[in-house]
Amino acid sequence: MIKIQGVTKVYTANSIALRDISVNIAAGEFVSVIGQSGSGKTTLAKLLIAEERPTRGSIHIGDWNVTNISPNEIPYLRRQIGVIFQDYKLLPKKTIYENVAFALEVAGENGHRIDQVVPQLLEIVGLAKKHDRYPFQLSGGEQQRVAIARSLAHRPKIIVADEPTGNLDTINTEEIIQILKKINEFGTTIILLTHNREVVNSLRRRVITLHGGEIILDQSEGKYVL
């Protein structure tokens, strides 16, 4: 599914985010990528969605050669990759229904399709009864659940979750992780970038550890060791 070969990302001579990393992630895996601030986690996420390009090396996702992808192809790639951020990135003047629907509208989906899909997505994240609320009326955990619903709008094969629980308390963190596990059970590949030791240790899934832009550990059932 995902093949990263010899990838280096250089911003300046004194800022090398990733150094010759190679890793394969199979379809349907749930992988945690861990590391302290500055280890290269966010750069890796940006490379996967073609927001950044590697300085050297190659990235293949399915049939996509992300390394050389053209600007016109990027929107189609991103329909295959749902992204969840730490800060939710919701539209404040739209209801949560409208926030999720907007992801479909910009892709040209018709109204009938949107009316079918959005309620299903809000049901998955447990917010069907709050469809008419605005982001400011929701807790942080609920806002992140809306972001997850939005990331599922195009039925992506991969979810990249970049510190999705970074702003949440323990209870909301557990709820978000349970939702991600449920999505993974449907066959979606999950790449969780996090520094949360408790989350990683509770998952008992594959753990890739970054340090100084290099992969220093790749454990099939690992723990947070830094």
Image (cartoon, grey):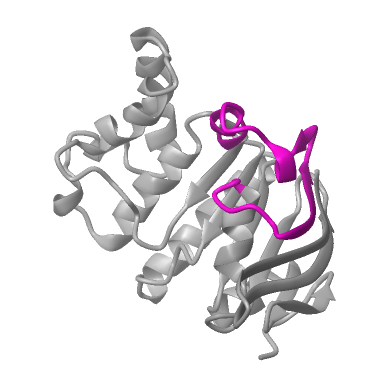
The quarter of the image holding the C terminus is bottom right
Name, please, the residue furthest toward the front. Answer: 13
Q: Which segment did they paint magenta?
A: 49-78
- 20 relative position to 33: left or right: right
Q: Does the magenta stretch include residue 141?
A: no
- 91 relative position to 87: left or right: left
Q: How many labels does the image show?
A: 0
In the figure, residue 39 lies in which quadrant? bottom right
Q: Which x, y percent locates residue 128?
A: 31, 35
The quarter of the image holding the N terminus is top right
Toward the viewer: 190 or 187?
Answer: 190
Above or below, 217 against 64 in this view is below
Above or below, 47 against 169 in this view is above
Q: Which residue is found at the position 65% from the left and 57% from the top?
A: 191
In the figure, residue 192 lies in which quadrant? bottom right
Q: Does the magenta stretch include residue 74?
A: yes
Q: Which x, y percent locates residue 209?
A: 72, 78
- 150 relative position to 25: left or right: left
Q: Which x, y percent locates residue 190?
A: 65, 52
Q: Which residue is found at the position 38% from the left and 50% from the top?
A: 145
In the figure, residue 181 lies in which quadrant? bottom right
Q: Which residue is found at the position 43% from the left and 33% from the top?
A: 121
Q: Which x, y percent locates residue 42?
A: 55, 66
Toward the viewer: 167 or 63?
Answer: 63
Q: Which residue is found at the position 41% from the left and 24% from the top?
A: 104
Name, please, the residue furthest toward the bottom. Answer: 226
Toward the viewer: 200 or 55?
Answer: 55
- 132 relative position to 56: left or right: left
Above or below, 63 against 5 in this view is above
